[in-house]
Image (cartoon, rainbow, N blue to C red):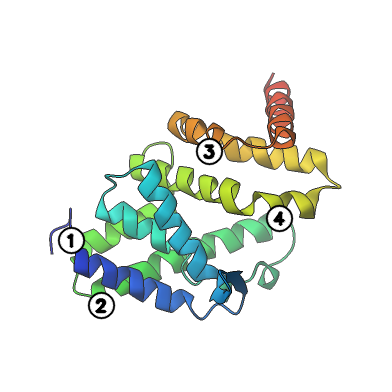
Amino acid sequence: MTSHAIPAALLEKVYAAIDAANGADPARVEVDGRSVPAAVLYGQRMTQVLARFIPDASDALKIAARGQHIERFTIPRETYPAGKAGYFRWRTELKNVHERRVIEILLGLGLEAAFAERVGKIVRKDRLKQDADMQVLEDVAVLVFLTYELDAFLLKHRPEPEKVAGILAKTWGKMSEEGHAAALALNLPQEVVDLLHQGLAARANAED
């Protein structure tokens, strides 16, 4: 197969294979009266948001969006030590697993090794500010968070406004200007905007 574009029918097979892998997620969510694996829903939302954000995204980017958290549920955070060192070890292992599983699926469906490896690299996002596809993937992940997961996040961390402000500011810093514009177009709650400004101000003061 070409490393730039693949037939639409094959792209759907890739999506189906990723969804099948994510279908083992024990966490379930209710969608239109149906119980759906949370990981499957997340991948589908990534696909939908990418289509709105970058309608002409490459096939490699489309697949990376669908599979960026493939089988994430197999490596719970609790299996690594608490603290920053344990967190970074966990994040590194997640990257390794996501990259490996996406590549395995693509090769299993007969796609070129170079194409599969490119998708794997996008999923890792190791060169976020130097790679346009990786940057778009990060923007889309944040847009999915702001669109679908923000309310639960705020409810969980409401007693910790400074922590929320810091997380929002750090997340904002990972986005591109285009991502910022798309996020602002979501008409975020004023509470979130205020916390974001608070976090950005704190980061600016810390850098002075």
Query: Where in the figure is residue 193, as x and y percent of width and height?
Result: 68, 31
Which three-letter amino acid code belongs to the residue tagged 4? Ala
Image marks 1 and 4: residues in contact by CB distance under 8 Å: no
Q: Secondary structure at mark 3?
A: loop
Query: Where in the figure is residue 26, as x and y percent of width and height?
Result: 60, 80
**Mark 3 neighbour class, 10 Å CA radius: few under 14, some 14 to 19, many 20 or more:** some
* Tag 4 residue: 152
* Tag 2 residue: 108
Q: Is residue 79 above or below residue 182?
A: below
Label disc, if present, on residue 174 of the rendered structure: 3
Q: Is residue 153 above or below residue 39?
A: above
Q: Name the side, left or right, on which 120 lies relative to 147.
A: left
Which three-letter amino acid code belongs to the residue tagged 3? Lys
Residue furthest to the left:
2
Mark 1 to mark 2 CA distance (whole Å): 15 Å
Label disc, if present, on residue 6 of the rendered structure: 1
Mark 2 to mark 3 CA distance (whole Å): 33 Å
**Mark 2 neighbour class, 10 Å CA radius: few under 14, some 14 to 19, many 20 or more:** few
Q: Earlier in the sequence, mark 1 or mark 4?
A: 1
